[in-house]
Amino acid sequence: MVKSTMKLTRRIQLLVDLPSKEERKEAMNKLYLWRNRCYRAANLIVSHLYVQEMVQEFFYLSEGVKYKLVDEKKDELGIFNRSRINCTYRMVSDRFKGEMPTNILTNLNSIILSSFKQNREEYWSGERSLHNYKRSMAFPFDMEGVCGLHFNPDKKAFCFKFFSIPMKTYLGRDFNDKWELMHQLVSGELKMRTSHLKIKNGKIFMLATFEVEKEKHELRPEVIAEATLSLEYPIVVKIGTAKLTIGTREEFLYRRLAIQAAFKRTREGVAYARSGNGRKRKTKALERFRDKERDYVNNRLHVYSRKLIDFCVKHQAGTLVLLDQEKKIELAREEAFVLRNWSYYDLTTKIKYKAEKAAIELIVD
């Protein structure tokens, strides 16, 4: 049965809603502590899961040993004194008890176990190494950690307590669907699933995951849209006799190559910049270009994928097929310039997300 809902993730900046600088600093230190404990717990959990999975390999000389990764009360061959998911939870809970909310540990344990099960065959065959969680990782939570969410008209922000820390949203001038999604969450029209909190460069971001209804369009599954992706023309789509070319090589590459050239010129000139205040002062001009190319490409790909899905909806195409993509990927790998500038994977990801939201079936040939 096809689901009528989908998960939608939005990055929302948060500010600590406390009056004094000392209180805000104390709150930030608490968040940094939670992140550190979460990072340590994540690496402990994945290590224990791997040892559990490979325990048979450690019985090198005992061929008769039999075991099952289940509770001994449920199966006589079980080697655990509790359920498998509870084993790792109790391990990190006992170690970090009182240092962070248990809700974070519960969600972290569940996410890592689910991810581990998906990759277990590759771990077993040696084709994949264990995931190494970094200190800067985002840590998970659910609605239990969002207490008293409401819109404050005086502050023009959504306010709540993130566990014990007062927070408010900062949406800036970007009045897109974040504003509407938050209002719907407050009114109970939609739900927020397991989300993440990330701290980057001293700023707090909530990676909120909403469960939303898919768009309802009058689509016909027998109407098929055939699309090809390439650097020459980012997207070419055909539905029956109707055809649409989205973007061109010159339009897509012009700004991107200009940003790359500007970055290169600035980098070469850093050595001659006026010194003072160390490395930060000399590389100040370079930092302005660091994310410009990424942001520009991200915007272009959003525009291209949006036009593609709108074209399919307009012609009631219920099926979208991406043609001959494997061959084009192989050709792109042979040419360094194309591989560096095509952004095929990002474009495919955005098309997949928008197709799912519009209830269009996507097939990659």
Image: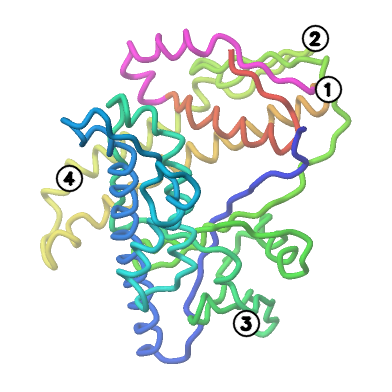
Residue 294 left/right relative to 362: left
Q: Identify the secondary structure beneath mark 1.
A: loop
Task: Using the numbered discs, state the Cα–Cα distance from disc 2 to disc 1 in whole angstroms.
Answer: 9 Å
Where residue 289 sits in the image (x, y, percent)?
A: 34, 47
The reply to whether callout 4 and callout 2 are in contact (CB within 8 Å) is no
Q: Mark 4 or 3 closer to N-term? A: 3
Please identify the dominant SS of the magenta region. helix
Where residue 324 sits in the image (x, y, percent)?
A: 55, 9
At horizontal 40% and vertical 9% (from top left) the residue drawn is: 331
- Residue at the spot of label 1: 315
Q: How crowded is mark 1: few (under 14 residues within 10 Å), some or many (20 or more)?
A: some
At horizontal 32% and vertical 29% (from top left) the residue drawn is: 124
Residue 327 belongs to the span the image colors magenta: yes
Looking at the picture, does residue 15 appear above or below residue 344? below
Give the magenta-colored segment's residue range.
318-341
| Residue 240, disc | 2
Query: Can you tell which quarter of the image residue 343 is in?
Result: top left
At horizontal 24% and vertical 28% (from top left) the residue drawn is: 63
Task: Using the numbered discs, state the Cα–Cα distance from disc 2 to disc 3 in whole angstroms.
Answer: 53 Å
Relative to the observer, which residue lies in front, 330 or 338?
330
Where, quadrant-wise, is the N terminus in this rendering? top right
Task: Using the numbered discs, state the Cα–Cα distance from disc 4 to disc 3 in whole angstroms.
Answer: 44 Å
- Residue at the spot of label 4: 269
Q: Identify the secondary structure beneath mark 4.
A: helix
The reply to whether callout 2 and callout 1 are in contact (CB within 8 Å) is yes
Residue type indicated by callout 4: Gly
Q: Residues within 10 Å of mark 4 (few under 14, many from 20)?
A: some
- Residue at the spot of label 3: 155
